[in-house]
């Protein structure tokens, strides 16, 4: 079953390759969505796909040696129809 989740990450998540790690990991698992740095130092990301694959992406991002996630806020949101890929937003 396809689902979509919005995540807000806090910690050492900007300036450490978080967005590009997220992009390549999400694309590797065939997920869609986006990731964006926020003005307050957090990173917001939306992932869409199978729940198990979403969990794998979050786990892999958290295991990166430069990224240190201290807090994750997670919200289930409606699926975006016809979304074709995962992108980095600026």
Image (cartoon, rainbow, N blue to C red):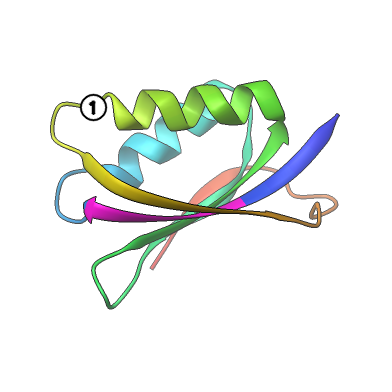
**Residue 90 against residue 73 in the figure, above or below:** below
Whether residue 63 appears in this view of the structure is yes
Which quadrant of the rendered structure holds the C terminus? bottom left
Quarter occupied by residue 48: top right
User: Residue at horizontal 34%, vertical 71%?
Assistant: 38
> In the image, is 33 to the left or to the right of 14?
right
In this rendering, is residue 63 above or below 90? Answer: above
Q: Does 13 appear in magenta?
A: no
| Residue pointed to by mark 1 | 64
In the displayed orientation, state which residue is furthest to the bottom: 39
**Dominant secondary structure (helix, strand or loop) of the stretch shown in magenta:** strand
The vertical placement of 31 against 18, above or below, is above
Q: Is residue 28 left or right of residue 3?
A: left
Instruction: Look at 33% across and 35% down and name the residue there.
Output: 21
Answer with left or right where residue 24 lies relative to residue 68: right
Along the line of sight, which residue is nearer the eye, 29 or 62?
Answer: 62
Q: Residue 85: image x %, image y %?
A: 63, 42
Residue at 34% of width from left, 50% of height from top? 71
Viewed as shown, does residue 81 lie left or right of 18? right
Count all numbered tags in the image, as a single digit.
Answer: 1
Residue 6: percent from left, percent from top? 59, 55
Q: 79 or 55, which is in the foreground? A: 55
SS category of the residue bearing label 1: loop
Q: What stretch is highlighted in magenta?
A: 6-11
**Residue 73, position as x, y percentages in the image:** 48, 55
- Residue 49, percent from left and from top: 72, 34
Instruction: Report if residue 13 is visible in the image.
Output: no
């Amino acid at each position: 079953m396809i689902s979509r989740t919005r995540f807000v990450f806090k910690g050492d998540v900007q300036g450490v390759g978080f967005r590009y790690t997220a992009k390549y990991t999400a694309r590797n698992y065939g997920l869609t969505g986006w990731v964006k740095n926020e003005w307050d130092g957090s990173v917001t990301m939306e992932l869409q796909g199978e729940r198990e694959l979403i969990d794998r992406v979050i786990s892999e991002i958290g295991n990166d040696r430069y990224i240190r996630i201290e807090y994750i806020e997670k919200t289930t949101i409606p699926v975006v129809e016809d979304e074709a890929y995962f992108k980095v937003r600026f």
